[in-house]
Image: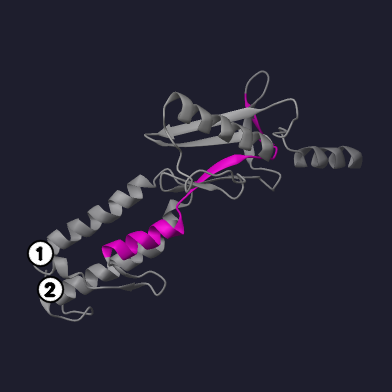
């Protein structure tokens, strides 16, 4: 029984696939308008060769040139920017989560998933959150301070709330498919709330503590 347990533990620690199999190559391609991202399961030399072939095709067949600033070969684990997201691959280090599997004759049983490599994640880049905060002049994201926005001082409180909600909802909806989007936007949400309170207080010429009359 000890031997069986040891073998089972060793088996669960092995990846279910070998993405670097020398006899197997895979390419993933995603495009939106004139932006595209190519994922290569292979060596760095394979990725550079594919990039050269893509550049030659665009130049010779479509009379297009790639952007040197945007075109690069990078390690998938370090990620790449794409359409405002940070796209990267990660390896599941643990033995994996539990999953239900059907049993012969009916019913199900709980088994542990084997670890996998090359799982793709979409993250919200911190630079995009900071850029949104600066562009909207909401306040200081590091200090979690909200700033009065003069463009709303002639608006009613209801109009302010609608405007702030619309701005945050637009950003949150865009990044809704990202992993950890809530934690990525928590700080920004707090700054926007404090900016809204500061703007309402300035509009009604009261302090942020009140008294409030809406």
Residue nearer the viewer, 85 or 183: 85
Residue under numbered circle 2: 203
Residue nearer the viewer, 210 or 199: 199
Q: Secondary structure at mark 1?
A: loop
Is residue 41 at least partly visible in the picture?
no
Q: Residue, x 69% and y 34% (percent of image)?
A: 19
Tell whether label 2 touches label 1 (CB within 8 Å).
Answer: yes
From which residue to which does the magenta span run? Answer: 107-136
Q: Is residue 147 above or below residue 125?
A: below
**Quadrant of residue 207 within the rendered picture:** bottom left
Marked residue nearer the N-terminal end (1 or 2) = 1
In magenta stretch: residue 37: no
Q: Residue, x 55% and y 44% (percent of image)?
A: 72
Which quadrant is home to the N terminus?
Answer: top right
- Residue 16 spot, x, y in % from top left: 71, 33
Residue nearer the viewer, 160 or 63: 63
Q: Residue, x 26% and y 73% (percent of image)?
A: 147
**Quadrant of residue 176 within the rendered picture:** top left
In this rendering, would 34 be left or right of 167? right
In magenta stretch: residue 118: yes
Residue under numbered circle 1: 155
- Residue 125 spot, x, y in % from top left: 46, 55
Q: Which mark is residue 88?
A: none
Q: Residue, x 59% and y 29% (percent of image)?
A: 27
């Amino acid at each position: 029984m000890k031997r069986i347990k040891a073998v089972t533990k060793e088996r669960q620690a092995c990846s279910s696939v070998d993405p670097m199999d020398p006899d197997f190559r895979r390419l993933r391609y995603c495009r939106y308008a004139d932006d595209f991202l190519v994922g290569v399961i292979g060596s760095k030399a394979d990725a550079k060769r594919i990039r050269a072939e893509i550049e030659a095709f665009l130049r010779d067949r479509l009379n297009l040139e790639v952007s040197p600033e945007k075109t690069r070969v990078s390690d998938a684990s370090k990620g790449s920017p794409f359409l405002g997201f940070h796209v990267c691959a990660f390896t599941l280090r643990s033995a994996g989560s539990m999953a239900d599997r059907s049993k012969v004759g009916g019913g199900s049983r709980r088994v542990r998933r084997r670890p996998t490599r090359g799982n793709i994640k979409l993250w919200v880049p911190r630079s995009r959150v900071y850029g949104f905060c600066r562009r909207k002049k909401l306040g200081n994201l590091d200090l979690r301070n909200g700033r009065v926005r003069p463009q709303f001082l002639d608006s009613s409180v209801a109009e302010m709330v609608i405007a702030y909600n619309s701005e945050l909802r637009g950003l949150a909806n865009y990044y809704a498919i990202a992993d950890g989007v809530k934690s990525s936007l928590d700080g920004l949400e707090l700054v926007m709330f404090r900016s809204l309170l500061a703007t309402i207080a300035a509009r009604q010429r009261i302090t942020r503590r009140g008294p409030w009359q809406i």
